Image: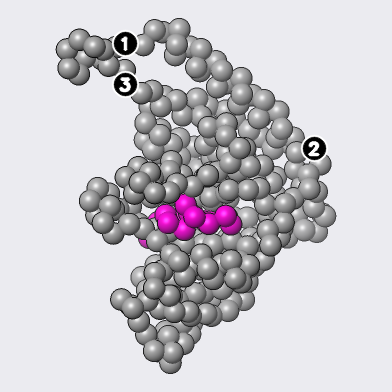
Amino acid sequence: MMQIMHRQNGYHSFSVMEEASLLENAKVMKKILVPVDFSEPSNEAYLVALDMARLTQGTIVLVHVLVLPALYGAGLAGETIAYDPTYFTQMETDARNMLEKMKGQAGPVPVTIDVVYGELISGLMRIIEDNNTDLVVMGTSGASGLTEIFIGSNTEKVVRFSPIPVLVIRKSIDIKSIKNILLPSTLDLNQTDFIRKVTELQNFLHATLHVLLINTPQHFRRDAEAREALEYFAKHYKLANYKLHFKNYTHEDEGVIDFANTEKADLIAMATHARKGLAHLFNGSVTEKVVNHMDRPVWTYHL
């Protein structure tokens, strides 16, 4: 089961040897972006980001995006109502005050705060580029039903479009407790950059990598074929400290969630695609479904 960390002064206490070992492997997780909407899941994600930043001697950008809805009058169709300037000022002031309170929990971790206006994804993408960010840590409460199909959670959208890895958190976790990473895979041999990022994460956490092939009726392999493909995949990418698994399920996302819960995976690492419009509506994304329905941390990166 997931372990909830015990903190002193807002962060977990590690031994000197543990910190030195983790820091040695923390090559690309030093600049962390944490988008917050001041909900409980985003607060939980911030706690995890603080632990990671302390271990990597990294920094955090804590940002709130003010997404302004369009207001329409009762007159001409499509006639918008202008905002009162004091409305903007008060919203930004309130947001900055709350961000300052969160910054006060950071202890020795350098934290900068920012409030940006505009659409969520474009706003975050600008911050990622401007700060040369390595990792996004983001909370989620998930989405379901028609909301999931037609709108999706904000976290799901960030997962879909982020050019850098995203760590999705529903509840805070002890970073040191992550020792088993589940890697669901189609075993394609054209994902070198993705596997490189996964192994960097594995080395940072000193974890065992569990490569999982889900056999579905649409993409079925016999047992011998599945074993051979898994072994060739591990050899091709020169994986170390790994275990290979294959299971039969009707749907890939159901298989990933069930296997993760049954085997008590500490974290799930998955690739994602930036599908848009009807292509996303009809094809969906296994990764985004797992993000919405999994209570364990999910780390994602673009193919």
Residue 190's x, y, as percent? 36, 70
**Amino acid found under the numbered disc labelled 2:** Asn
Q: Nearer the viewer, residue 189 or 119?
A: 119
**Quadrant of the rendering where the N terminus is positioned:** bottom right
| Residue at (47, 52) in percent of width and height | 292
| Callout 3 crowding tier (Cα within 10 Å): few <14, some 14–19, many ≥20 | few
Using residue 90 as the reference point, say whether residue 171 is left or right of it: right
Q: Is residue 72 visible?
A: yes
Whether pointer 3 and pointer 2 mark residues with C-beta atoms closer than 8 Å, the reply is: no
Q: Is residue 298 magenta?
A: yes
Whether pointer 2 and pointer 1 mark residues with C-beta atoms closer than 8 Å, the reply is: no
Q: Is residue 61 visible?
A: no
Which of the two marks, 3 or 2, is nearer to us in this view? 3
**Amino acid found under the numbered disc labelled 1:** Ala
Of labels 3 and 2, earlier in sequence is: 2
- Residue 279 position by quadrant: bottom left
| Magenta span | 288-303
Q: Which residue is denoted by mark 3 in the rendering?
A: 70
Q: Which residue is denoted by mark 2 in the rendering?
A: 9
- Residues at marks 3 and 2, CA–CA distance in whole angstroms: 42 Å
Of labels 2 and 1, earlier in sequence is: 2
For numbered disc 3, what is the local secondary structure? loop
